[in-house]
Image: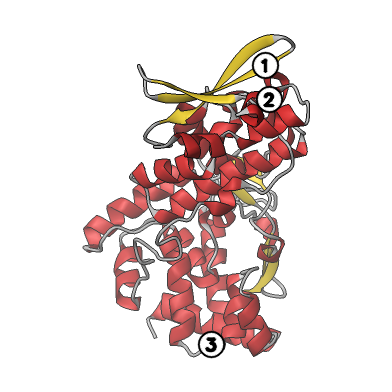
Amino acid sequence: MRQRSRSGSVVLDKRIKTWNFFFWEKGKRRSRKIGTTNQFPTKASAWRAAKPLRDAIENQITISNTTPTVTRLVEQYRAEKMPKRAMTRQGYNTWLNHYIVPTWGSCTLQELHARPVDLWLQSLNLAPKSKVHIRGLVRALWDFAMWRCDVPIQRNPMELVTIKGASKRVRQPRSLTVDEFHQLVQQLKGAFHTIALVCVCFGLRISECLALRWSDVDWLNGRLNVERGIVHQVVDDVKTPESRRSMHIDNAMLKVLKTWRQTTEFSAGDDWMFASSVKIGRLPISYAGVWQALRKAAVKAGIPHISSHTFRHTHRSWLDAVGTPIGVQQKLMRHADIRTTMNVYGTATTADMAAASEKVTALALNGR
């Protein structure tokens, strides 16, 4: 009991069913909320959850100054450590604004321990992969707080949080058959028709496709240079260094691009390949515009729901269908994380990549 007195004490507020940690600081008695009785059914479990606070007292650290609220910590994280890439920032802000801050914003970081966070994640009606993203962001906040010395350096409690089914897909990725793709593109007009062909022939992400400029095409050597992406009409870097690549263009696909360049009113070298006439060519067509065009075309073609990323999955499926070695697939998909595949199958040659690209283009343009 003496040890608990020197290190603070845990008391249950029976009215609102919460555990509170009481301690003395500079001659004044202070308290911090630990959690509810649902989160910590016993006093012993609440005592264990208060360990970071007890450690701070024993190390003579001022708790009020070193334990900012989650809202304050998030503000500091955004200013100092938030990733710079627009798409990544958008995803982080989604989880922060819609889940972490509304639930935990008024709490101190010590209240985000393994068990309460685990129970909270279980209660969310989200896919396992989304829960993994949220857990990862909470882990990043803990690391950030330790980096700032807001809390003592310790094992990150999020390492103890497990997400059931995290490695399994709730929805299998959608790929189009050759017939389905041709039915779809027949319903797409103008720029959207060419966008679909470019995405399926090169396996581009929609952010990379919409960010193409005419200067990215090497007409003489038949190469397409993927240099940038665009997210919410903000030009940004590509997803990974591996994504920045010069890709082979089949002769048939070159003719498609030449035809589109002769059709569009924005055909200068610095113009966007899929410039928006609404924005007078200053920006490319928005993702929302592409999504609406795909949705309408899919309905007319009698194809179940698809997205722009369906073309990237289709590209991979067709590479398999034409017998492309896995090493060549890794290069054409511009994946940075299929390390085991590359170690087993080696590095693809340029000739193999060109042959595989030509076969996929033939499927897209001719159906054979």
Q: Amino acid at mark 3?
A: Thr
- Please name the residue shown 46% across and 30% down the image: 35
Q: Amino acid at mark 2?
A: Arg
Which dot marks residue 24? 1
Which dot marks residue 6? 2
For residue 155, above or below residue 258? above
Q: Secondary structure at mark 1?
A: strand
* CA distance for labels 2 and 3: 68 Å
Q: Amino acid at mark 1?
A: Trp
Q: Residues within 10 Å of mark 2 (few under 14, many from 20)?
A: few
- Please name the residue shown 71% across and 27% down the image: 57
Question: Which badge, 3 or 1, is on the more N-terminal residue?
Answer: 1
Question: Which badge, 2 or 1, is on the more N-terminal residue?
Answer: 2
For residue 341, above or below residue 225? below
Disc 3: which residue: 324
The residue closer to the viewer here, 354 or 15, is 15
The residue closer to the viewer here, 274 or 343, is 343
Question: Which badge, 2 or 3, is on the more N-terminal residue?
Answer: 2
